[in-house]
Amino acid sequence: MSGENEKPSLVYGEIKDNQNVLDLEKITIMKSAVDSEDVPMEHKIRLNQNGDDTNQTIKLYKRRWFIVLLFSSYSLCNSFQWIQYGIINNIFMRFYGVESFTIDWMSMIYMLTYIPFIFPVTWLLDKKGLRVIALVATAMNCAGTWIKVTSVRPNLFAVTMLGQFCCSLAQVFILGMPSKIASVWFGSEEVSTACSIGVFGNQLGIAIGFLVPPILVPNVEDMDQLAYHISIMFYITAGVATLLFLLVVMVFQERPELPPTQAQATARCISPEQYSYTASILRLLRNKPFLLLILTYGLNVGCFYAVGTLLNRMIIEHYPGEELNAGRIGLTIIIAGMVGSLICGIWLDRTKTYKQTTLTVYLMSFVGMLVYAFTLSLGHLWVVFLTAGALGFFMTGYLPLGFEFGVELTYPECEGTSSGLLNCSAQVFGIMFTICQGKIIDNYGTLAGNIFLCVFLFIGSVLTGLKSKFTNMTIDPKLVPLDTKGCTFKKIIMF
């Protein structure tokens, strides 16, 4: 475009053929709407898509709450199964006749499966959308639960491992979704809260996974009776998973008919041909603040995975026969973390202080881990409940913080891609920390194992402070790409 009639592009630089570009008047309308502090529930805008003018209404649907709650429910069902073996580690060891480290792999398989599958799953999300991902996730989760129903015999450990693998594969289609659902369905002032609700379901599932298995599967000596209790737990899980699969098939919607924000309206005007998944990954890997976030997020959440997986072993070592209280302590960690997640989500929606909040929560996670490490062996379970709750409030509360900070740092890349890379880092560190801490506990005791995690949380705190320094840098707007299909635009207009 050239000459006197040249019009500004959506981003710096020229866009030829005038396709998918807003003319000056329409951009001005959207800019005023974005800059306004009081954006109405519905707002008329005009969009130019492939040269044609169209009218769209920005609207928030009540259905958005049902969608995010349905997602949270099947995320809950899946995450429950992550820890259902580990929290009664000693019972499953005896039932299947395997070593403690083998039962640890029932948790670590969730982490291991995520690493190779996250990239094809993220690509599928970009190409097929939310509904396909939700259907595959709930179908795999449902299949895994019924496979485990058939595995309740001491010689069928391989079958129960297969069922757990199916559920771990379903997790790949779940973990990175909260920020995507929040951006597609919710208004700009609700995104962090909606993301926290999505993460809330995952955390609640882990909480139930800590609490329910010790209740449903008591440590009885008779193997037939033990098999009966295990089968009851597996049947209940399978029934819930089947119901959730049917609900997703019947009512889960790809996206609202009308976009919830000006950002999503703009995103819908960009053709799929302009999007390159590989280019998006490469841009993220050249983003220094985001690379530091990948590392620090992995360190923090990896420590949480290790604590959750090995909690039964740590509690039983100091408090023999307290399997039920081990589950309750795990529940305390997660419930406190859910409160922390919701508070952080609401706080971010109101203040947008991502750097300061992230650094504060990270430092408190380190302090919480340090206090937990030195109080675990005091011989007072009530002290462990208190310190574990404080640890969970900050460590688990960091999960949605990391997601939302990642979206801010990687604008305007797709949320599913940035969340996928963050979760991939968490799984890698989760496996490493679980194996290393388990070996340290076996050889040197629980204090040494927990100090091992404290060291890495301290390193993560230092790197988080360094990340805050990096994020003060100004990014050249000319580097902002055009291929932003399906992403959250938090700063739509550039002149």
Image (cartoon, helix red, strand yellow):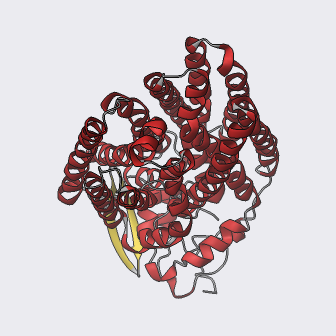
Front-most of 292 and 148?
A: 148
Quarter of the image with the C terminus is: bottom right
Front-most of 39 and 8?
A: 39
Q: Residue at x 57, y 86 (%)?
A: 16
Query: Is residue 32 toward the left or the right of residue 64 in the image?
Result: right
Quarter-of-image position of residue 381: top right
Q: Residue at x 26, y 35 (%)?
A: 225
| Residue 269 in view of the camera | no
| Residue 23 in view of the camera | yes
Across and down, in percent, residue 84 comes to 41, 41
Q: Residue furthest front?
A: 222
Across and down, in percent, residue 51 comes to 41, 81
Quarter-of-image position of residue 174: bottom left
Quarter of the image with the N terminus is: bottom right
- Whether 227 is drawn above or below 163: the answer is above
- Whether 286 is drawn above or below 94: the answer is below
Q: Residue at x 38, y 56 (%)?
A: 167
- Whether 488 is drawn above or below 482: the answer is above
Front-most of 298 and 440?
A: 440
Across and down, in percent, residue 405 comes to 62, 47
Front-most of 344 and 30?
A: 344
